[in-house]
Amino acid sequence: MRARLLITSLVVASVAGLTPGSADPLGLESLTLSGPETYLLAEETPFTGRLTIGDFGVPRFNIDLLVDGEVGASGVTADDGTFSVPVVFTSAGMHTVQAVAHRTTPLEIVSNVVTIDDTSVSLTIVVEGMGTVHSGDGRIACPPVCSASFVGGSRVALFASAASGWTFDGWIGACESGTDCEISLLEDRTVGVRFSQSPA
């Protein structure tokens, strides 16, 4: 199951102190914001948007992205009014992101709200031969605990260890080499690990 991005319909920009539809002294028309369908915790997620400007010819505006109501990232519009600002999510769950364009207080233009809602995904480990696999957070300790649920977009570190008299041969459906493996969970996933008996 993938984390889905829900974008509200276009909202005409409002200028602080003015009601929607009232005269805008700088000819500003609207500010829109969009983002990706999925995100990974602790990694940059780009959000893009556009400030539509009227005939007045306005210089560049500062852009603040409000994450759950607090400023989480900032940038500046390009000459054509577009912008791209990355956000790093450090906590799981549902988040709202909204752009605010401003040049001088109290003038500001507010965008539509983008909501990112992550969902639970499962990780299942299949062991062939004699050995164990555990995750860095301790939720997987296989065997016997070979399956667990995680927040969609999580990165999970896996570590394989061969039993005495056995050799680690590799991962199946994940990392190409090494007993340590880090995977991204954007959907339900099964990862195998193979151990072979050492020559006598």
Image (tube, grey):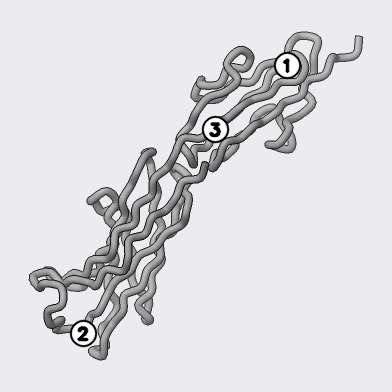
Q: Position of residue 32 (x, y in %)?
A: 33, 69
Please state if 20 lies on the left or on the right of 32 as rendered.
Answer: left
Per the image, the residue denoted by label 1 is: 162
Q: Closer to us: mark 2 or mark 3? A: 2
Please state if 166 lies on the left or on the right of 115 as rendered.
Answer: right
- Cβ atoms under marks 2 and 1 closer than 8 Å: no
Per the image, the residue denoted by label 2 is: 27
Which quadrant of the view contains residue 109?
bottom left
Quadrant position of the C terminus in the picture: top right
Per the image, the residue denoted by label 3 is: 156
How many numbered markers are drawn? 3
Residue type at mark 3 is Val
- In terms of sequence position, does the residue under pointer 2 or pointer 3 come before the other? 2
Q: Residue at x 54, y 42 (%)?
A: 186
Residue type at mark 1 is Ala
Q: Position of residue 63 (x, y in %)?
A: 29, 66
Q: Position of residue 19 (x, y in %)?
A: 11, 72
For mark 1, does the 10 Å Cα neighbourhood hold few (<14), some (14 to 19), or many (20 or more) residues? some
Distance between mark 3 and mark 1 Cα atoms: 20 Å
